Amino acid sequence: MWARFAVMILVIIVTLTTPTAHALDNVSLNVGTIAGSQWKLEGVNIALTDLSQNPQKLALTIAKLSLPKPFNDLNLVNIRCTAFTWQNKELMCEQGRAEMRSKQWQSPTANFSFHVTEKRSSFKLTALHLAGGIIAIDGEEQGELWQLQIDAKAVDGKSIQQLLPQDRFKLKGGKINVKLNASGSYARVNEFTLTAGLNGLTGQTKDGRLATEALVLESTLNAQHNNGLWQWQSHIEINGGALYAEPLYLEAAGQNIILDAQGDWNASDKRVEIKSASYRHSKVGELSGSATVQYKDGASLEKAQLSLNSDNLQDLSAIYLKPFFEQTVLQGVTLAGHLKADFSINDQFLTALAASFNNLDVKDAAGRGEIQGGVGQLNWANDETFSLPSKFAWRQLQVRAVPIGPAELSLLSRADSIRLLKKTQLPFLGGAIAINQFNWQAKKQQDPELSFEGDVSNVSLEQLSLVLNWTPLSGTISGHIPRVEYSNKTLSLGGELIVKVFDGEVKISNLASSGLFTDFPKFHSDLEIENLDLDQLTGKFKFGGITGKLSGYVRQLYMENWHPVTFFAWLGTPENDDSRHRISQKAVQNIANIGGGGAADLLSKSFLRFFETFGYDKLGLGCYLHDGVCQLMGVEARESGYAIITGGGLPRIDVIGYNPRVDWNVLMDRLKRISTSDEVIVE
């Protein structure tokens, strides 16, 4: 290379000292290629121009300067130096101009200088106006080592869009500052620091899964290469604007969002080791920990140890949980309170969780339930030998419209199961529900299995009917709830469910339900009713008042989608009932209307209409439902039909039913009109 320069200078000297020099306008020498260990100058040409003038102009032009890998996509072209020197095997361009070119674009002309020696080469490109910003590039190589600095200031986001692939990300506005310091040897990068600043950046990817709106962000990435392993540290801070990364939408209005992380990257096995990371969203919470990510066949989380701390669950759930709740059973659920949680992940599955919370409030927009003043500690591990208990207490719990008072549960949660550790009582509508046993067991590709056993004591019927929006009832409910099991999509009752109500007793047996949580549940049961107080039962209804006792049964009850398909039922006065038997005129009329009898007409046309109540001996009505038709029966058969009420005492009255077969839907319609209207309906 240097021999070529000696020849060039000799030619120029000879040319200047010969008589023919004044006949020439310029003299040039094509040097060709000058190659360093990392850089390469192509199309080098030195020319002496304006020979007729004094002084003459000496100019160096270079077609292309190629940068070393990994920056070989960028080249400097159309280089022209008007002030350069060569001496002692040293070439220096002190005053020049050049353009930068990549595969997608070419820049305007910028200030350029370079310095080439046998052992060291360097170049500088300054005042490069590109995409509305100013860019400076400074490179140096010495032996096998090289350094490169790039400083881009106030680059316009909309303008730079033309320099980027059009099918990935579309920038609409904002300013970008980027500074890169890199060093390496041959084609390998050994170390780099990348600093980027975004001011008001707006844009989005083609698929819309990532978008920014007036985003203000500062970030720094440092990385060092050591024996095939990259060691890196990063810092990202969002100070303004908004970021959408599906499904999360982060708005930094008046808040800082900061992510600090460090770790190792092994390019050969495609694994990123995050040794420590901290994600802080001011006034919302902080997530910290470590993780290993494998991205050989798509990104997967091999393992992670994470901690979450939030004193503002309300904002945390609104920003980070709500997007994941959409289109799930948790849609509309919001949280408030304080939470601290530690959890472990292996092969993308949660393996351990320890969470403590207080002042927890849970609300559901769909009205399915609510928790107020929750406090407790949840411990879980995917380990059958795990034995650390969990505790959960609340000030108020509501399931649908039903309130449950303050209580505490002690549970053991491990692997796929939850078990109640000790009996507990839940205050419920003036009484209590005792939970004596509770087990929940998850099953792969099946519904979970569940078992429960408990007691109900002194629950107010008046309060229960009020919260369920029923006609107000009086009295209390007490009883034992035997073992209830849910398995293989079937709910079954082990034993009899005994409910004490209206001073009597209702026994539920042979209870079973399949497809309970499907669109077509099926239900089987038998009921035995003993000595209910009719005065308590009818006193609150528009049906009319009756005194006495009521017993009966509903056997072989089968329902589909909560509609009766078949059963055999009887309700009537029990044998040996010595209580007072009276029935109101309104009740007589409504019972007659159910059976299609003529008592209503008799009452309206005779002196009996002046009596408010009547005595009766027995009353009773039965139904055998089959194929949508109810076969009716009464306390005794009569020539013209069947007796629903037989008279007793004064004044007395008999109610006879004349229609033994009634369509079930018609019968339900009659009962519905009776229960919702103050007027007596005679058909």
Image: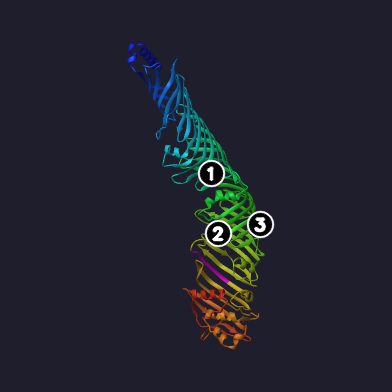
Secondary structure under the numbered disc 1 in the rendered image: strand
Q: Is residue 652 visible?
A: no
Going by the numbered disc 1, the residue's amino acid type is: Gly
Q: For residue 9, what is the image quadrant?
A: top left
Which of disc 2 and disc 1 is earlier in sequence? Answer: 1
Q: Is residue 646 visible?
A: yes
**Apparent side of residue 44 relative to residue 341 in the rendered image (left or right):** left
Task: Give the answer, above or below, for where 532 lies relative to 37.
Answer: below
The spot of residue 589 in percent (x, y) is 56, 81
Going by the numbered disc 2, the residue's amino acid type is: Ala
Q: Is residue 522 magenta?
A: yes
Residue topped by disc 2: 366
Which numbered circle lies on residue 241? 1
Which numbered circle lies on residue 75? none
The spot of residue 40 in percent (x, y) is 41, 24
The spot of residue 595 in percent (x, y) is 53, 80
Residue topped by disc 3: 395
| Main SS class of the magenta portion in the image | strand
**Apparent side of residue 423 relative to residue 103 in the rendered image (left or right):** right
Q: Foreground: 1 or 665?
A: 1
Q: Quadrant of the N terminus?
A: top left
Front position among marks 3 and 2: 2
Crowd class of label 2 (few under 14; some 14 to 19; many from 20; radius 10 Å): few
Whole-angstrom CA distance, mark 3 to mark 2, is: 21 Å
Crowd class of label 1 (few under 14; some 14 to 19; many from 20; radius 10 Å): many
Going by the numbered disc 3, the residue's amino acid type is: Arg
Q: Is residue 182 magenta?
A: no
Secondary structure under the numbered disc 2 in the rendered image: loop
Whole-angstrom CA distance, mark 3 to mark 1, is: 40 Å
Secondary structure under the numbered disc 3 in the rendered image: loop
- In the image, which residues are magenta? 520-527
Front position among marks 1 and 2: 1
